[in-house]
Image (tube, rainbow, N blue to C red):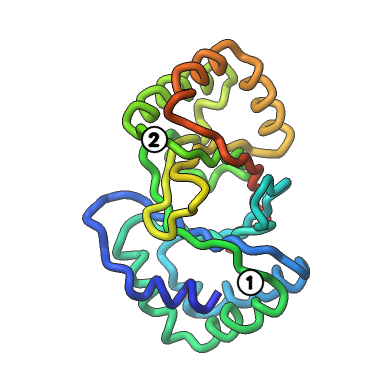
Amino acid sequence: MKNYLLAFLTFTSISLEAQYCVFFDFKAENSEMVVSTITAAMNTDWAKNIQGTKSLFAYLPNGSTESTHSIQFCFPNEEAFENAFMSYGQSMDVRLLLDERLSEYSIDVSQSINTPIWYNGEDWAEDNVFMLYQMEVTNPAAYLKEFKSFSQKMAKKLGYEENSYGLAFPIVGKNGDFSHFAWIGSPDIKTALSNTKKMLSDPLFAEFSSKVSGIRKVVNTVMSVRVMDF
């Protein structure tokens, strides 16, 4: 994780008021030691002073990606992001844990800074399970228009209007396989699976898929489960 975290120290602020979520996706070769090491890192002064959320997620299942887990830091604005990562290099304790010890038990797969284009829900930290749909979108404006209309209708129909759902994209660390991803949050696995099954068989979904078939290709689907917050 060393090269990934240090690379962010050169990040320059973007004049956009939005939330930023940094994903460090990795393949865990010893899950127990990974959780122990990350927990120790999140108990350092550096992590405690972060102005944002700190969470560990597991991909169950992980689709076509090699990643099994993701450490995610979400910041409310550019200043909070910059403060966290500019101070990272000064914390020897957390660098020892994340740069050296974590690499003994895991393999880095990808890293990215992600920001929402549009979303529903004040705080996605309230949801514990997310269905993620990674896509290659060739006409973002047209897709967003259709997605907003469809997702709001479907949320009302299936009763998850208060949950978090939306469309986002990586602005740094773009994945070569996809340009955007949509998410739908749920309180637990059974609700996520049940709503997904209902959505895929609903006429609204068929209509939406037909409208965006020429501008969107789904390349991977993932269930992301919150393991713990720090």
Q: Nearer the viewer, residue 212 or 17?
A: 212
Q: Nearer the viewer, residue 209 or 124?
A: 209
Q: Residue 198 occupies which quadrant of the picture?
A: top right
Q: Position of residue 134 (x, y in %)?
A: 54, 41
Quadrant of the frame with the N terminus: bottom right
Q: Position of residue 146 (x, y in %)?
A: 40, 22
Note whether 62 is above or below 6 in the view shown.
above
Q: Which label number is shown at residue 38?
A: 1
Q: Residue at x 27, y 50 (%)?
A: 17
SS for callout 2: loop
Quadrant of the frame with the C terminus: bottom right
Q: Position of residue 181 (x, y in %)?
A: 49, 41
Note whether 47 is above or below 130 in the view shown.
below
Note whether 229 is above or below 205 in the view shown.
below
Q: 10 Å neighbourhood of mark 2: few (<14), some, or many (≥20)?
A: some
Q: Residue at x 72, y 47 (%)?
A: 60
Q: CA distance from mark 2 to mark 1?
A: 37 Å
Hey, which residue is sitting farthest bottom in the picture? 92
Q: Residue at x 43, y 33 (%)?
A: 120
Query: On the image, numbered disc 2 is attached to which residue?
Result: 138
Q: Nearer the viewer, residue 230 or 87?
A: 87
Q: Residue at x 32, y 31 (%)?
A: 141
Q: Is residue 145 left or right of residue 1?
A: left
Q: Position of residue 34 (x, y in %)?
A: 70, 70
User: Which mark is first along the chain, 1 or 2?
Assistant: 1
Q: Is residue 10 left or right of residue 99?
A: left
Q: Residue 89 occupies which quadrant of the picture?
A: bottom left
Total residue callouts: 2
Type of amino acid under label 2: Thr
Type of amino acid under label 1: Ile
SS for callout 1: helix
